[in-house]
Amino acid sequence: MDDLEEEIRAHLRMEEQENLESDMSPEDAHYAALRRFGNVTLAEERSRDMWTWTPVETLIQDFRYGLRQLRRNPGFTIIALLTLALGIAATTAIFSIVDSVLLHSAPYQNSNQLVEIGNQSPRGERDLVPAGDFNDWQEQNQAFQGLAAYKKFEFRTLNGPGQPDEVWMSPVSTNFFDLLGVNPSLGRTFAANETSVVILSHEYWRSHFASDNQIIGRKLALDGQPYTVIGVAPDGVELPDPNTQMWTPLTLTAADKADHEQESLNVIGRLEPAVTLPQAQAAMDVVARRLALQYPKTNTGWTAPVTPFQLPGVGGVLRAAILALLGAVIFVLLIVCANVASMLLARGATRHTEMGIRAALGARRWRLIRQLVLESVALAGTASVAGVALAWWGLRLITNLVPEHSRLDTHAIHRIGMNLPVLAFALAFSLLTGITVALLPALRISNLNLNESLKGCGRTSDATGRGSRLQGALVVCEMALAVVLLVGAGLMIQSFQRLARAPTGFVPDHILTVRVPLLKYKYAPGAQSTRFYQEVLQRIRALPGVVSAGMANNLPFTGFHTTVILPLPGSAPGKPGRTIGVMERTVSAGYFQALEIPLLAGREFTPPDYDPGARCVRIINQAMARQYWSGEGALGKELYGACPRNAPALIVGIVADSKQNSVDSQPQPELYEPYAQHPSFASFLITFVIRTHGSAIGLAGPVRRAIWQVDPDQPAIEVRTMDGVIADSLWQQHFSASVLGVFAVIALVLSAIGVFGVLSYSVSRRTHEIGVRSALGATTSDILRLVVGEGLLLTVIGVAGGVIAALGLTRLLASLLYGVKPTDPATFGGVAVLLTLVALLACYLPARRATKVDPVVSLRYE
């Protein structure tokens, strides 16, 4: 710019010199040169506009001016920042959950080329793939770059330094990771024909081995056999399950490769680049027909359907809960936007004179709008930093709601967190929110009456005009949205409380549970495993403070159960007839006493029932007695199809019904068998139930020591109370109620802030009117009624509208509620009273401020 000024001065000197040569005086020559050149300042500005990018400079100027304006109003800035931060935090946290659970795509190279290949019977039933079929598919494959097989999971015992642990291991073919296009974060993947090696999941490496970078090459003892760690999978590998902790090579023997009958494998493939899904299906149809001709006994009529690869899905209840939370956070966001827009309107009303001066100096309306929007964007941008921090803290609280012991239904919610997509979403969302909340106030404020603004009349002319009405409308909307959220949260919390108090059919107090998965490599099913558990039970029963103890292969409310199909009485053996499905549970003597499940008839299991040659005996519950024998006396009856030795089982006892899968379900027909008569059945789930005199968790240490006195290599895991087991089974309902409750509290606080802001603005704009009223004899009570009445009117209108909206919207929550009607009058009434009380509290400070208006000062000021 110095060069520009020097050039202009040189031009003027040349013009003066020419004038001097024309016999002008020096003064006349100077002014004549200036007159001929024109406005020097204007010329400089025009030249600068040509040499610089003016829009960027003015944008920066407006942005810096907006920051200065925010610093000049710290009260407004802090409240607006906190409001926006709450909205951004809630939205970012829920987006993290949605992204991790519902939108999470397969993190594998060219995942669109991955497919699943199943095994479908002639009746259309899907099943696993026999190892022999998989081997032939590999040899005859023409449409795939490769095929890989895996088994869902195997439980192994990890021994070594520290306490024994159970790990969730998946055997996979050696080309598994290469087929997925996954490179390990440490080490390498499997080599062909490799055995006795493992790859750790990233989560298990972090939690169990403290992210030890020297883990590669370490020997691990799994089920007593040495395995070498060769790699650590990258974070995000969720196949075959999000909770897989280790992978080991899948070894197929010659006998396995010749087996076309035993379905045992899951198969995935990667399509050739030029092959489409229909072409791959046609190729597999050819292979299936060829195998049917080659193995007619096992493969006739079986097909190999090819479907796109999908990650493990999310259950319907959890999906519905997350979608409900997504809807709730949208309501919170609308309340935040209405609140901040209301504050911007109130603040903007005091800036009419400023905007009038800017307009008089040549600023167009779009420039005024841009100034106000930039201030809001700066506000939202700053709030996004606090919002992301709050979201990170909130996500840690949310993940703590997920039980660590439940592996099958958490869907990796415990792994949600902040990542680049979430941070990008938070930034973009903040900018969008800043623009959105500023548009309405900016359009309203920039619509100036220039004469009134410059005369200062705008300050009072809008006190009861459109600006106040618009603020009131925003507060009414806030109240209505808050009602919907509070009603939804109230119903969810009430539902959760009813679930937590629902009867289970047994007494969960003072019960300790410990899962002791059997070491298969040390204890063969039968007498050996029976002796181990009997000795452990004896030691536990001898502990001080133990009232009774038993064990079961399937603890209630853990998500595991087995159903056995039995023929109904009257069905001829060997011929088709009516059947009934009943839940089957293997238990020991003392199980019913420990849970205090009442024995209604007959006897419990006794030591003679554990003899190898003892007759098959069973205990049933009331539901099975009603459904199986239709009111006849079940005690002493024989039950066919329930004994592994193909002999009829004798019903020796009937116990009361108890819930097994969830507290909101009805008791199902259930069959109990002595552990000794079926010792290999789900032995990895064997759990001791121990009733105590005092604190159950206080016996955790002695119980573990009693188990390790029998075998120090035996894992004793998932030590928790029965109350904890039931609470863990309700984690989805607890999760939904807790998060929705937090959103409702946020909505309540924001609504109170909205009422407070509107009334504070109204009092500040009506100071003269209040002074006149006081001068004419209005008492303090009259002023209080005036201000509080205005706030209550807005509250009543908002609550009424919210109740009407909630009556319709809360019906959508009906599928998530237990024992609570979505139109519960008590909940609606309680929310209305709560909001009214909060509004009264929000009205108090502005009303007190109004009563302290000095009429003399206010009239003189006006």
Image: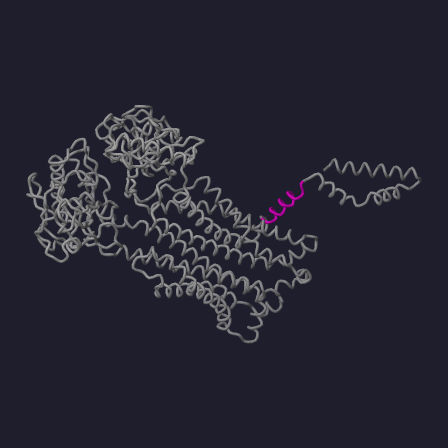
Image location of residue 823, percent across then percent down: 36, 63
Image location of residue 33, percent across then percent down: 85, 42
- Residue at the outermost right position: 23
Left or right of 779 on screen, residue 296: left
In-front residue for pair 212/525: 525
Q: Is residue 62 magenta?
A: yes
The answer to whether one can see residue 545 in this image is: no
Left or right of 147 on screen, residue 777: right
- Residue at the outermost bottom position: 777
Q: Is residue 120 above or below residue 784?
A: above
- Quarter of the figure with the N terminus: top right
The structure residue drawn at horizontal position 37% and vertical position 66%, both measured from the top left corner, is: 829
The structure residue drawn at horizontal position 61% and vertical position 69%, both measured from the top left corner, is: 859
The structure residue drawn at horizontal position 23% and vertical position 55%, both measured from the top left corner, is: 666
Region in magenta: 53-66
The answer to whether one can see residue 487 in this image is: yes
In-front residue for pair 457/234: 234
Numbered-mark total: 0
Q: Quadrant of residue 677?
A: top left
Q: What type of secondary structure mainly makes up the magenta span?
A: helix
Image location of residue 428, percent across then percent down: 51, 45
Q: Is residue 160 magenta?
A: no
Image location of residue 577, percent across then percent down: 17, 49
